Image: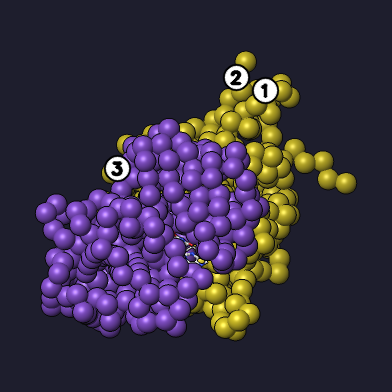
Chain colours: A yellow, B purple
Amino acid sequence: MMPDMKVKLCGIELNNPIIAASGTFGFGREFSELYPLSSLGGISCKGITLAERDGNPTPRIAETESGILNAVGLQNPGVDHFIKYDLPWLREQNTAIIANIAGNTVEDYCTMAEKLSDSDVDIIELNISCPNVKSGGVQFGTSCESVGNITREVRKHCSKPLMVKLSPNVTDIAEIARAAEAEGADALSLINTLTGMRIDINSARPIIRNNTGGLSGPAVFPVAVRMVWQVSNAVSIPIVGMGGISKWQDAVEMMIAGATALQVGTALFNDPYAPIKINEGIEKFLSEKNISSVTELTGTIKPW
Amino acid sequence: MSYDSQIFKLTENKEIAKGIFDWTVKNDELPARAKCGQFVNIKVPGRVLRRPISICDATDTTLRLVFQVKGEGTKVMSQMKPGEDVEILAPLGTGFDIKPGKRYCFVGGGIGVPPLLFSAKQTDNPMVIMGFRNKDLVILKDDFKAAGAELYTATDDGSFGIHGFVTDVLSEHMGEFDEVCACGPVPMLKAVAEVCRGKVRCQVSLEERMGCGIGACLVCSCKTKIDGEEHMTQVCRRGPVYDAGEVFYDA
Ligand SMILES: Cc1cc2nc3c(=O)[nH]c(=O)nc-3n(C[C@H](O)[C@H](O)[C@H](O)COP(=O)(O)OP(=O)(O)OC[C@H]3O[C@@H](n4cnc5c(N)ncnc54)[C@H](O)[C@@H]3O)c2cc1C
Ligand SMILES: Cc1cc2nc3c(=O)[nH]c(=O)nc-3n(C[C@H](O)[C@H](O)[C@H](O)COP(=O)(O)O)c2cc1C
Ligand code: FES
């Protein structure tokens, strides 16, 4: 019998647990030339802001051992453009649509949540963890007080399921997770990137024009697994796990740690077909283990 | 479907100049879709990011890729053996806009020369001006001759061909062609664009560090002015080739 790959996230049924991670998949069009987007559980769209943004100067990316640094700086066409030009097409792709939003002020977030609540998106992902913009982003995501505050305010303007995306650049992620849950988050996603830096030894110049960037890819995977586990012990809302997932074994491991669904980002740059291969691998693993549904993996960790 | 990531078979890998390698890779489907000035993104064992390399030449079933060893990834590539499989995402980007009935001058600097070969082959009676630092780095001379090009080779130190810069040669021959296509380091591209300004159309091929290679991740953005409007565009998709005025407008 084929195992059931469907999972439920905030009442939304996903085709499978693999969601394309925000910022690595655009609004899906480019990857749809490779495979139907219905082969994904969902798409977390590129982070959008109230007004169009050009982002940071280039270079915006650097390679590290087993990872990458990026500092795109939220280049995006703005929320209205997204709703008008990207969303209608996305909606036809038979996959869940997650809008990832970032703002300079709490009001920005609330205005966007309001606009998106009137739109066709399935879930709103509150990005309070972007390390690459001067104002906004991660400044809202590093203390319990500010996370609680922004979650509470956005909640008032948001009639869609609200998922709060957490930063790993904090002392105690479990505490932050509890603050978001207490103020009405329906789900949590983690981790965003870890702030990092690379320097060219010949020029003594940072490789990334923004000097620092966000680390992602296999290098961060163990950190992400640890944080998903800690957060799953701290809250009872579902967790979307991400950070360095590049093969099906990683996906299974992250679900065992406590994730209900997953996002895959950097792995797409190494292999654009990574999400497809990961789903195939999970399915085979479940068959071999006689597990009938992928949902049975979530939180099955037996800690010492 | 325009591009895809598929397995290619490496059939040849030879060092054609110091640190410069010449690959031939085979695949039954993707090479036939290649247009001049496009590039590919190569998965390198042990590296997270793929490496973007221009299409130097193409047949219906093969691509020729010429690259210089710079860092870790290209070093691994230089050591790969014929018979090995390589995963390649291809063909990518928007190449040179070649119009029938015009005479083209192709201007290349250093490792920017390779994509001009496939391009020159698409035109009648092309002029090719290529510049290198010194004689040890001169590549593809015989290939351009075989393609019937009127060829000028310059070196910065005069150790081979003309002693001087490609722009000197270009200025000298102004009037003998209708359009210019250039690939090489940005200072060279800007100088070529300056020589062409107000005289002939000039297309330039840019480089930028890349992630996805297909236009989704926005790491390769470039400030451009297209039809009078300023926009960020992706070098991997709208580029790598632009009209010089689209990218060098505020220089
Ligand atoms: C559209 C395009 C076409 C190109 N065509 C050719 C070609 O035909 N022949 C050739 O020799 N080189 C070409 N390059 C440059 C080539 O991509 C880099 O030299 C190569 O990626 C360096 O990799 P590395 O592993 O040796 O260096 P590393 O320093 O180890 O690379 C680290 C990271 O930086 C990136 N990077 C470093 N330098 C560059 C660069 N100049 N441009 C883009 N990314 C870079 C790498 O891709 C990698 O992700 C092209 C670049 C682009 C964007
Ligand atoms: C190029 C790039 C752009 C990103 N842009 C965003 C973004 O706009 N919003 C966001 O919440 N996260 C963004 N991220 C973070 C990813 O969504 C993800 O949290 C992180 O990369 C870890 O997962 P990974 O290792 O699978 O890539 C970006 C990551 C990368 C590599
Ligand atoms: S490399 Fe991803 S958009 Fe160009």
Tell whether label 1 touches label 2 (CB within 8 Å): yes
Task: Identify the residue shown where x is 37% and y is 82%.
Answer: B163
Q: Position of residue A176 (x, y in %)?
A: 64, 63
Residue furthest out toward the right? A304
Quarter assignment of residue B111:
bottom left
Q: Position of residue A139 (x, y in %)?
A: 54, 74
Q: Is mark 2 within 8 Å of ligand 2?
A: no
Which residue was labeled with disc 3?
Answer: A89
Q: Is residue B12 visible?
A: yes
Q: In the image, is B21 to the left or to the right of B62?
A: right
> Marks 2/1: CA distance?
7 Å
> Which residue is under mark 1?
A287
**What crowding class fits label 3: few (fewer than 14 Cα within 10 Å), some (14-19), or many (20 or more)?**
few
- Find residue A272 and report its horizontal and vertical position in percent: 49, 45
Q: Nearer the viewer, residue B175 or A31?
A: B175
Disc 1: host chain? A
Disc 3 residue type (three-letter): Trp
Residue at 31% across, 70% down: B152
Examine the rendered structure and indicate whether residue B57 appears above or below residue A79.
above
Q: Please, which chain is the residue tagged with disc 2 on?
A: A
Discs 2 and 1 share one subunit: yes
Compare residues A181 and B231 and report the one nearer the observer. B231
In which chain is the residue bearing label 3?
A
Res A2 label: 2
Query: As rendered, which of B111 and A284 lies closer to the eye?
Result: B111
- The first of marks 1 and 3 along the sequence is 3
Where, by quadrant of the figure, is residue B4 drawn?
top left
Q: Residues within 10 Å of mark 2 (few under 14, many from 20)?
A: few
Asked which secondary structure carries label 2, the reply is: loop
Q: Quadrant of residue B186?
A: bottom left
Q: Amino acid at mark 2?
A: Met
